[in-house]
Image (spheres, grey):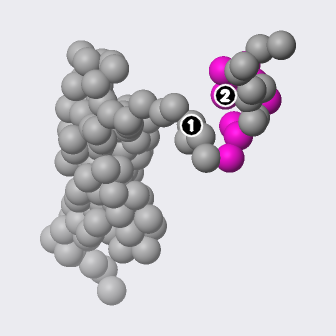
Amino acid sequence: MSDVPPPLYPRYPATPAAPVPWGYPWPVAPLPPQLPGATTALVLGIVALAGGLVLVVPLAVAPLAWYLGAKASRLAEREPGRWRGAGSARTAMVLGMVGSALLAMLTIFAVVVITLMWVAMLTPSPY
């Protein structure tokens, strides 16, 4: 017989799906840092769209969300393993694009309405 006692826990394969015995933590790597500017851009994009549906004024930050999201997305593409949060940057970019399109349409609509009102005020009325 051997002098070595059997192990107290069963030997599982080292895969993430295998259960880990009590007292043995998962071997995890530390998370990479959050992409700088991605969360800010995402918050600005959400504020622009959600606030733009209630009031028109928050739509003014949509181009800023688009810019910050594009900047963060470029940084994530340059160094893919260094940052996390590239999805937030892309989502902020899309929200900024949609908000900027709404802002442009509302601006064009406001210019047309103001022009028509100005023309109507200058036109003499027969009444």
Residue 94 position, x and y percent, is 41, 38
Residue 14 is covered by the magenta coloring = yes
Q: Residues within 10 Å of mark 1 (few under 14, many from 20)?
A: few
The disc labelled 1 sits on which kind of residue? Trp
Toward the viewer: 51 or 31? 31
Label 1's element?
loop
Residue 17 is covered by the magenta coloring = yes
Toward the viewer: 71 or 3? 3
Magenta stretch: helix, strand or loop mostly: loop
Residue positioned 68% across, 47% down in the render: 22
Query: Which quadrant is the C terminus positioned in?
Result: bottom left
- Residue 59 figure quarter: bottom left
Residue positioned 30% across, 30% down in the render: 83
Task: Name the residue that disc number 2 marks.
Answer: 16
First in sequence: mark 2 or mark 1?
A: 2
Task: Name the residue that disc number 1 marks.
Answer: 26
| Magenta residues (range) | 10-22
Determine the residue located farthest toward the top in the rendered image. 1
Residue positioned 56% across, 37% down in the render: 26
